Image (tube, rainbow, N blue to C red):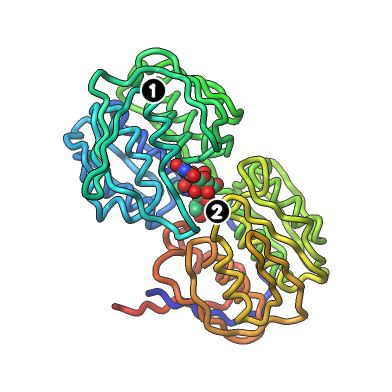
Amino acid sequence: MEIWRIRGGNPLCGSVRVQGAKNSVLPIMAASILIPCRTELINCPNVRDVRASMDILRCLGCTVEQDGDVIHIDSRTLCRSAVPDALMRRMRSSFTFLGSILARCGEAALTRPGGCELGERPIDLHLEALGALGARFEETDGRIICRADKGLRGGHIHLRYPSVGATENAMIAACAAKGETVIANAATEPEIEDLQNFLRQLGAEITGAGTSVIQIRGISPVERVGFRIMPDRIAGATLLCAAACTGGEIELRGAVKEHLAPVTHALRAMGCRLREGSSAITISAKRALHSAPLIETGPNPAFPTDAQPLLMAVALRAAGTSAFIENVFSDRFHHAEEFRRLGAEICIEGRTALVTGVRELYGATVVAADLRAGAALLLAGLSARGTTTVLDEGHIGRGYEALDIQLRSLGAELEILHEMR
Ligand code: EPZ
């Protein structure tokens, strides 16, 4: 258990660099085993989910080394096609290994993945997509055995919903299929484009990422790949919202302005001043903020669900009422219930949360139920009067590298106490 103790009230000011993207590096690490080769990934965040992915790669027989923000993977020694349940449960993204192990070995044995509790998180779209490429599945005693006895063959995949993970699994597996694959209604999140860029470096012929139709025509293997992971748009949004919550002013270095557009648009509408350059975004929230425009989450290019808790933290003290509609996950308002303990005025009905800004929040003890909810609680604590304690069973460290150090460098007063269990 990690206990974050925050003394709120300081406006965050200064300059910070955004970390590499967790949700980009995870599928790319899975894709690195597609062919026997050596991969060097640069700008990897040192977070718990990335370490879990390293453990899966090692368990499969790969050699993995970490040197600062660089991860070296040698997949030539891969010798297993099964991932134990304990490793699968460590994160949702473990399921992206299904497509890559199947592509490399012709079979895979996995269990259902773990990850943040955000409501139901089925895997039907992943299985349907791989099924369209000739994979067959059997689920017994909690184990999913997947085979492509005659090898994977290219096919037409129409995703019923543009799932990020299912799109990634299909892209990776299709590289090893014979013939052309078309993925229609594909997810268009920036991380999908990063995966396409990596797969191209591996020798794949793939186009269309970033649009809803992706075409894959196979792979001409290479021996060695070097790739730089894109900046983390949600970690970037977290820092911008931290400045907005506390009436601060920060420069966010290394962020891609296009990736953050839905969030910067909302912050600007609330009264923040933003300047978006090619290498940095600056935000100033020196004047009082007003309510957010309607925030309705959805697949890209709609407002990202991962930033919904963060923007809600900003709305807690903004004048007027802000409406949040969560369309992606069925149960992603845990943070809202905890915000109320800090004095927030929030009314939740189904997928809608109405937040009426209060003049002041006050410190209390709250519980982080998932990764972004945890980050949002830290932001609310930073803008509250008095001391806030955030109890976290390790969620925040799954996606943020040294967030405490980064926030302290901006003037936040906080510390993490570790309680051994
Ligand atoms: C990715 O999860 C991200 N994780 C999530 O980030 C993010 O919230 C989500 O995309 C949406 O943007 C990673 O990239 C590692 P989905 P993923 O499949 O791929 C339903 C964070 O905080 N669905 O697009 O699991 C599902 O239930 C995390 O960094 C099915 O019905 O998301 C959900 O309602 C949390 N069947 C919706 O689709 C399936 O087979 C979106 O899920 C798969 C998904």
Q: Quadrant of residue 243?
A: bottom right
Which residue is at a point 41% across and 34% down the rendered structure image? Answer: 169
In front of the other: 256 or 393:
393
In the picture, which quadrant includes the C terminus?
A: bottom left
On screen, residue 108 above or below 208: below
Residue 274, x across and y down, in percent: 77, 54
Q: Is the CB atom of the residue marked by disc 1 within 8 angstroms of ligand 1's nearest atom?
A: no
Residue 250, x across and y down, in percent: 68, 61
Q: Quadrant of residue 76?
A: top left
In front of the other: 93 or 418:
93
Residue 357, x across and y down, in percent: 76, 73
Q: Is the CB atom of the residue marked by disc 2 within 8 angstroms of ligand 1's nearest atom?
A: yes
In the picture, which quadrant includes the N terminus?
A: bottom left
- Check the image and name the residue furthest to the top: 179
Label disc, if present, on residue 408 of the rendered structure: none
Q: Is residue 6 left or right of residue 198?
A: right
Residue for badge 1: 175
Asked if one can make out residue 58 in the rendered structure from this viewpoint, the answer is: no
Kind of element beneath mark 2: loop
Amino acid type at mark 2? Phe
Asked if one can make out residue 346 in the rendered structure from this viewpoint, the answer is: yes
Tag in front: 2 or 1: 2
Which residue is at a point 65% across and 84% down the rendered structure image? Answer: 362
Q: Quadrant of residue 286?
A: bottom right
Label disc, if present, on residue 329 of the rendered structure: 2
Residue 19, x across and y down, in percent: 51, 52
Counting residues from the N terminus, which is met first, the one under dot 2 or under dot 1? 1
Measured in 3D between alpha carbons, the distance from the residue under mark 2 to the one under mark 1, in whole angstroms, is 29 Å
On screen, residue 196 above or below 373: above
Amino acid type at mark 1? Cys
